[in-house]
Amino acid sequence: MTSDTHLDLYRFCSRCGSKMTTRKLKSGEPLRPFCENCGHVVYLDPKVAVGTIIANSQREIAMVRRAIEPGYGKWVFPGGYVDRGETLLRAATREAWEEVQLRIRIDGLVNIYSYQDQVPIIIVYGAYSIGGELQRDDESLEAAWFKESNLPWKEMAFPSTSQGLRDYFNGVLHRHLI
Ligand SMILES: [Zn+2]
């Protein structure tokens, strides 16, 4: 585990308030925040994010340039973290509306991406814009439609952004998986 996985955020025990240490409970497991005083263990789970590749009738893709870290100034398709208790499709639809003011029809699953020592698991859908006007929100510097040939490949915010778009344009879309 590295600092990317936020092990160092757990400084005090949420049960008894003692200082937390870290411990490997079994061989082969990662270090986990551990309280020597009461034995409380914190199991750090991944976070689930959805991203949506949204096409319009001209086969252009909606992208936003991020105004926040990580990935400040770089491009990504709309997406965000799934709230606890929220379905994936609702999260994807909500993020598309909140971030770029587009109403979408989700057509299928593109792929699921995970990376060593990184917290998020990113689920990427393919969708079609059925209403609204592409706009940016306060978490982005701009929003724009891109043809495949004009996509800013060198300025993508995350590995899952490039990989998702490559998969999508290679025809990966599982229409039965939504
Ligand atoms: Zn404790």
Image (cartoon, helix red, strand yellow):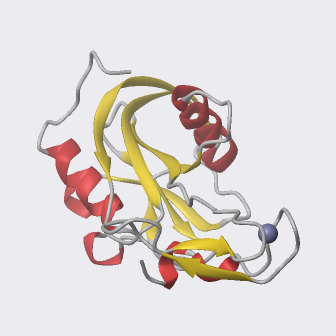
Q: Residue at x 70, y 57 (%)?
A: 137
Q: Is residue 50 left or right of residue 166?
A: right
Q: Nearer the viewer, residue 46 or 170?
A: 46
Q: Residue at x 68, y 78 (%)?
A: 9
Residue 114's image quarter? bottom left
Q: Residue at x 65, y 35 (%)?
A: 94
Judge whether residue 44 can be spotted in this image: yes
- The quarter of the picture where the C terminus appears is top left
Q: Is residue 75 left or right of residue 44?
A: left
Q: Nearer the viewer, residue 123 or 17?
A: 17
- Looking at this rendering, what residue extends furthest in the left direction? 170
Q: Is residue 116 left or right of residue 174?
A: right
Judge whether residue 133 can be spotted in this image: no
- Ligand 1 quarter of the rendering: bottom right
- Looking at this rendering, what residue extends furthest in the top direction? 176
Q: Is residue 147 left or right of residue 104?
A: left
Q: Residue at x 17, y 36 (%)?
A: 172
User: Where 57 sits versus 156, above or below?
Assistant: above
- Place of residue 66 in the rendered image (x, y in percent of width and height, measured from the top left): 56, 70
- Place of residue 115 in the rendered image (x, y in percent of width and height, measured from the top left): 32, 64
- Place of residue 149 in the rendered image (x, y in percent of width and height, measured from the top left): 19, 58
User: Where 132 sits versus 159, above or below?
Assistant: above
User: Where 74 sits versus 114, above or below?
Assistant: below
